[in-house]
């Protein structure tokens, strides 16, 4: 197998490449971005590259290569110039923190995202669901990784709490400090040639997990990690590395916010249990608030749908309305949102929560 294949090169990219390859360009994958320097893995190993003028002058910030991108470059001595970014399989994005509507692409071409939470004070089911929703919406498989299992007497309790949310995605317990068992776990569950990303708040143990999976301390290259005033190492840049079994992992800096974005102007909160019930609602566009013939409300009242699942659905729905209100037709949406808020409020009063 070629180096590029071992880094995830597949038919999708090969087809794009063959259609494009008229200028003797080589292909490579972005492993790290250090200021203006793009570190690529290429068929001959690592290579430092810069952007072509045309790419650099692009007004569209999302057109810039991101970690995980496959690019075409021209080689000049020991360096290269990136000419083209190949069409992405997917983009992991979030709402730009602070901004109302902007979308920020964190990394691209990802098979599965580890949503890491500690089973300590970090554990937060609402935040977890926001991550799951957003990751799914980006077309990426979410995997929940509950770390710091060594800190609590009954870590299984947290696994059950996640399972009760009803998303049906895999949930694993971990203690990153147990290096040997973590390394074995990664070798068993992470697949060669697949790209994973570690997501979660700062301090949940993402880098410690990755180091355990690697079996050695990742070299602190450039802006990969920096010490803060308390002497703690916090990750400051995204970086793609290959494990010894051939799987690929991106470590990312911890995030304060992981806001959801919307692909178009439709509000979508997707939950497997609610989506299934929704087929039986009288109205196709039912928001499961107070509509007559709503199968979701029916299931909540007869106990077939856990209250907690419905409650977080309402909360996520409200967040989406809030986001949508600032993206498109603001006035109309605010009117709708006002209506929904009233209905949610009425529902809460009725069911006392
Ligand atoms: N007890 C315990 N401590 C852990 C575990 N995993 C990580 N830690 C500790 O938690 C602290 C933060 O770990 P990091 O790996 O730096 O966290 P991070 O998620 O990479 O943080 P950022 O890079 O800031 O996003 C370190 O002091 C680790 O030693 C664990 O499983 N159990
Ligand atoms: Mg880190
Ligand atoms: Zn309904």
Image (cartoon, grey):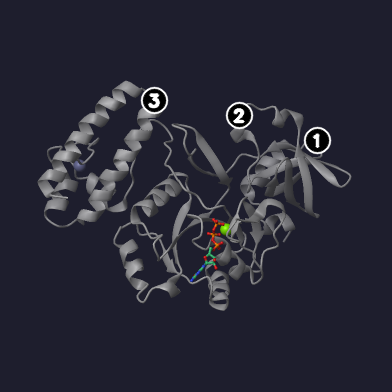
- The answer to which quarter of the image holds residue 262 is top left
2 sits to left or right of 107: right
- Along the polypeptide, which appears first: circle 1 or circle 3? 1
- The answer to which quarter of the image holds residue 80 is top right
| Residue 136 image position (x, y, % from top left) | 43, 48
Q: Above or below — where is 95 with respect to 142?
A: above
Q: At numbered mark 2, what does the secondary structure look like: helix, strand or loop?
A: loop
Q: Which mark is residue 328?
A: 3
Q: Above or below — where is 305 with respect to 101?
A: below
Which is more toward the observer, 3 or 169? 169
222 sits to left or right of 144: right
- Along the polypeptide, which appears first: circle 2 or circle 3? 2
The residue beneath circle 2 is: 60
Instruction: Name the quadrant where ligand 3 sits.
Output: top left
- Residues packed near mark 2 inside 10 Å, few (<14), some (14 to 19) or many (20 plus): few
Q: At numbered mark 3, what does the secondary structure look like: helix, strand or loop?
A: loop
The residue beneath circle 1 is: 23
């Amino acid at each position: 197998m070629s180096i590029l294949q071992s880094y995830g090169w597949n038919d999708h990219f090969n087809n794009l490449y063959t259609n494009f390859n008229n200028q003797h360009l080589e292909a490579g994958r972005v492993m790290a971005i250090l200021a203006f320097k793009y570190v690529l893995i290429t068929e001959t190993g690592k290579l430092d590259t810069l952007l072509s003028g045309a790419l650099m002058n692009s007004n569209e910030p999302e057109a810039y290569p991101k970690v995980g991108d496959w690019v075409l470059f021209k080689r000049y001595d020991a360096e290269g110039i990136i000419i083209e970014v190949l069409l992405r399989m997917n983009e992991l994005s979030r709402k730009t923190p602070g901004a109302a509507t902007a979308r920020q692409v964190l990394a691209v071409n990802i098979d599965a995202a580890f949503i890491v939470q500690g089973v300590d004070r970090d554990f937060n089911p609402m935040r977890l669901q926001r991550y799951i929703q957003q990751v799914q919406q980006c077309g990426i498989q979410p995997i929940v990784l509950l770390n710091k299992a060594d800190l609590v007497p009954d870590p299984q309790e947290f696994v059950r709490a996640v399972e009760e949310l009803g998303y049906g995605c895999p949930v694993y317990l971990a203690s990153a400090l147990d290096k040997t068992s973590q390394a074995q776990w990664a070798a068993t569950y992470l697949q060669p040639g697949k790209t994973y990303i570690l997501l979660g708040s700062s301090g949940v143990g993402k880098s410690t997990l990755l180091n355990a999976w690697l079996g050695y301390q990742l070299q602190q290259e450039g802006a990969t990690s920096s010490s803060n005033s308390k002497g703690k190492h916090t990750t400051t840049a995204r970086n793609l590395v290959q494990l010894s079994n051939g799987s690929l992992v991106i470590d990312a800096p911890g995030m304060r916010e992981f806001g959801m974005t919307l692909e178009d102007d439709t509000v979508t909160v997707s939950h497997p249990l609610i989506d299934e019930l929704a087929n039986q609602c009288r109205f196709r566009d039912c928001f499961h608030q107070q509509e007559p013939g709503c199968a979701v409300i029916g299931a909540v009242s007869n106990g077939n749908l856990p209250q907690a699942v419905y409650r977080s659905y309402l909360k996520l729905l409200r967040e989406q309305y809030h986001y949508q209100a600032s993206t498109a037709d603001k006035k109309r949406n605010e009117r709708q949102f006002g209506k929904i808020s009233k209905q949610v409020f009425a529902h809460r009063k009725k069911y006392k929560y």
